[in-house]
Amino acid sequence: MDFLRGCLTLIVTTFLIATLFVYSILPKMRNIHGVNVMCFLASMIFMNISFALRLLIKISDMPTGLCPIIAITHHFAYIATFSWLNVLCFGVWRMFSSIRSPKPTPIWGKPFFYSSLYGWGIPLVIVVVGQIVQHSDVPDYVIKPRLPSEMYCWFDHKYRGSVIAYLYGPLIVMIGANNIMIVWAGIKFCQRSVESSKVTNVSRNKQRFKVILSLFVLMCLPWSIGMIFFMAGINFNRLVTGIFNALLPIFIFIILICKPSVWKMLKLKFPRMSPFFLTCEKLGSRIVCKRSKHQPLVAVEENPSNSNNTTEMNKIGYQHPAKAESTV
């Protein structure tokens, strides 16, 4: 069973690698938001690969030192995935909380530096502190991570204090912060949708908010349920979690890549592969674009001055949301 789960995890991880590859080859996708998404994807790829190795290789068959490397890598990537999701949620919160329009900033400027300091720094501090405590002669009341455990290349859930202190505790704080930022951004978004007459900006922000909200629900809701079960001492079915973990990279690929604007950029980048991308676009549109037919009607309803809607759109250079959206 573990071997099957490990193979399945590696197979579906290719969807994350493909998503990261698309972001890396399309210049318009590599704005500050896109680079943050790439860091989120990279951390999740390492999390899945290290998880698959834990399942595929028995501890008895591992060379000396491999088990700690896999465990520490998985620990770091696990927390980094949620810390970068934290960064993405903060970006959406800041986008809707700021009164002024955001100024264009260099990709490798201060915003990305601070994002990296948080996204990579938080997991690094937790892992390093845990390993220092693990290999130090500390009093008994100090909780050690016990990573890796004697039986697993991971935490031993029998030691609940270790799991809470070095894994679930930080994740609970991050997920709680994400909840606050997403709810606040949703309230501000509804206010902006009613008050703003700039349909193009509203549509672009709406697309980005939907993407981050989808990632937030996919990542945080199931893990929150898992944490609740762990705290309550309930053993949840591994088959259910295995199926979800297998579907998660596919959902992320659909959310981030299966959009008309992305397929259009790919067709321009690789003209010879246009038939393939066209087929993928048609398949993707059947899955995620059913609501797009009603999008113009929603845009009209959101604007309180419906009678002058066409004139106002012409003045501001209205574009279809898929064309107006540079990157999400």
Image (cartoon, rainbow, N blue to C red):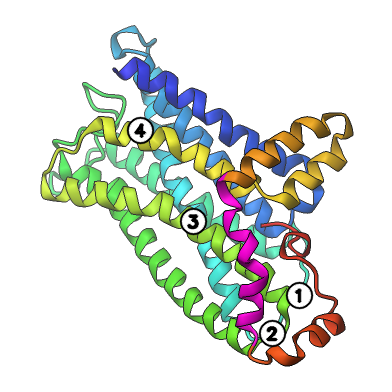
Task: Using the image as rendered, state which of residue 138 and residue 236 is in the foreground.
Answer: 236
Measure how far apart labels 4 and 2 are at the Cα level: 44 Å
Q: Is residue 227 left or right of residue 99?
A: left
Secondary structure beneath label 3? helix
What amino acid is at disc 2? Answer: Arg
Segment tinted magenta in the rendering: 287-303
Residue position for label 1: 103
Distance from the alpha carbon under mark 3 to that under mark 2: 26 Å
Q: Of the residues shown, which amino acid type is indicated by label 4?
A: Ile
Q: Are marks 1 and 2 in contact (CB under 8 Å)?
A: yes
Circle 2: element type: loop
Q: Is residue 245 left or right of residue 323?
A: left
Query: For mark 3, what is the residue?
Result: 214
**Residue at the top extreme of this rendering:** 61
Q: Residue at x 30, y 46 (%)?
A: 166
Q: Amino acid at mark 1?
A: Lys
Name the residue carrying label 2: 100
Residue 306 in percent (x, y) is at 69, 88
- The answer to whether residue 102 is above or below residue 88 is below
Q: Which residue is mark 4?
A: 243
Q: Earlier in the sequence, mark 4 or mark 3?
A: 3
Please name which of the two marks, 4 or 2, marks the residue nearer to the observer: 4
Amino acid type of the residue that numbered disc 3 sits on in the rendered structure: Ser
State which mark lies toward you, 3 or 2: 3
State whether the magenta stretch is mostly helix, strand or loop: helix
